[in-house]
Amino acid sequence: MSEAAIRQKIFDIISAVPDTGIGHLYERWAVDWGKFIEFFKDSASGRILGWEITRPGVASQRLNNIENQDDHRYVVKFYMGVKDADATELLFEAKIEAIRAAFRLNITLDGECNGTSAMSKTAGDTRMFGSVLCHYAELTITATEF
C-alpha cells in the first residue's frame, strides 16, 4: 500500500464510471483561464466535463513501535459546463451520484488501503472559469492505511 497506489486506484475507479469526462491524477494549474479550461474540455462534445484529484492532508498516528496509521484525505474537484436548456445541474448531480456509488461497496479500493470513509460531496456551486460558467463540486474520501 502507498499513497501513489491509493491515488491511482481512486483515479481508476472514477475513470470507469461512464461519461465523467477528462480526469487528471493531480491538480492542474494554469495562469491563463483558457488553458485551464482546455484541461477539462471534451473534444467530442466541446463541453467542459472533467475532474482532478488532490490530497490536501494526511493525518498520522503511531499504533505501536513499528506501525503507523495514515488517513489520507483526497478531494476530487469535478467540473461541468452549465447549459440551462439541457438541465445540466441534474446531469451533474447524476454523475456525482454515479461516482459515489462506484466507491460505496469498494471500501478497500481493491485492496490498496485498509478502508475508506464514504465518499461525500463537501462543496458545490456554479463558478466562472474565465468566460465559462461551470458546475463545480468537491467530493472527499479518506483512505486509511497501516
Image: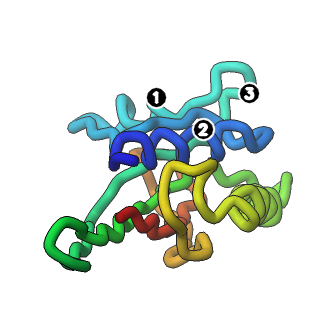
For the residues labelled 2 and 1, say whether their Cβ atoms are less than 8 Å apart. no
**How far apart are the two marked residues, 3 and 1, measured between alpha carbons?**
13 Å
Amino acid type assigned to the residue bearing label 2 in the image? Asp
Q: Residue at x 24, y 69 (%)?
A: 68
Q: Residue at x 64, y 46 (%)?
A: 14
Q: Give the class, few, some or many, for how many residues have Cα within 10 Å of label 1's Cα (few <14, many ≥20).
A: few
User: In the image, is residue 120 above or below residue 56?
Assistant: below
Decide which of tag 2 and tag 1 comes sooner along the chain: 2
* Percent coordinates x, y for residue 56 in the rendering: 28, 63
The residue to which callout 3 is attached is: 45
Decide which of tag 3 and tag 1 comes sooner along the chain: 1
Is 34 displayed left or right of 126 in the figure? Answer: left
Q: In the depicted view, which residue is nearer to us: 60 or 79? A: 60
Amino acid type assigned to the residue bearing label 3 in the image? Ser
For the residues labelled 2 and 3, say whether their Cβ atoms are less than 8 Å apart. no
Amino acid type assigned to the residue bearing label 1 in the image? Glu
Q: Give the class, few, some or many, for how many residues have Cα within 10 Å of label 3's Cα (few <14, many ≥20).
A: few
The residue to which callout 2 is attached is: 12
In which quadrant will I find the C terminus?
Answer: bottom left
User: In the image, is residue 41 above or below residue 20?
Assistant: above
* Percent coordinates x, y for residue 110 in the rendering: 63, 48
Q: How is the image coloured?
A: rainbow
Quick one: which residue is furthest to the left in this view?
A: 65
Q: Residue at x 22, y 73 (%)?
A: 60
Q: Secondary structure at mark 3?
A: loop
Q: Secondary structure at mark 2?
A: helix
* Percent coordinates x, y for residue 41 in the rendering: 57, 31
Q: Residue at x 40, y 47 (%)?
A: 1
The residue to which callout 1 is attached is: 38
**How far apart are the two marked residues, 2 and 3, measured between alpha carbons?**
23 Å
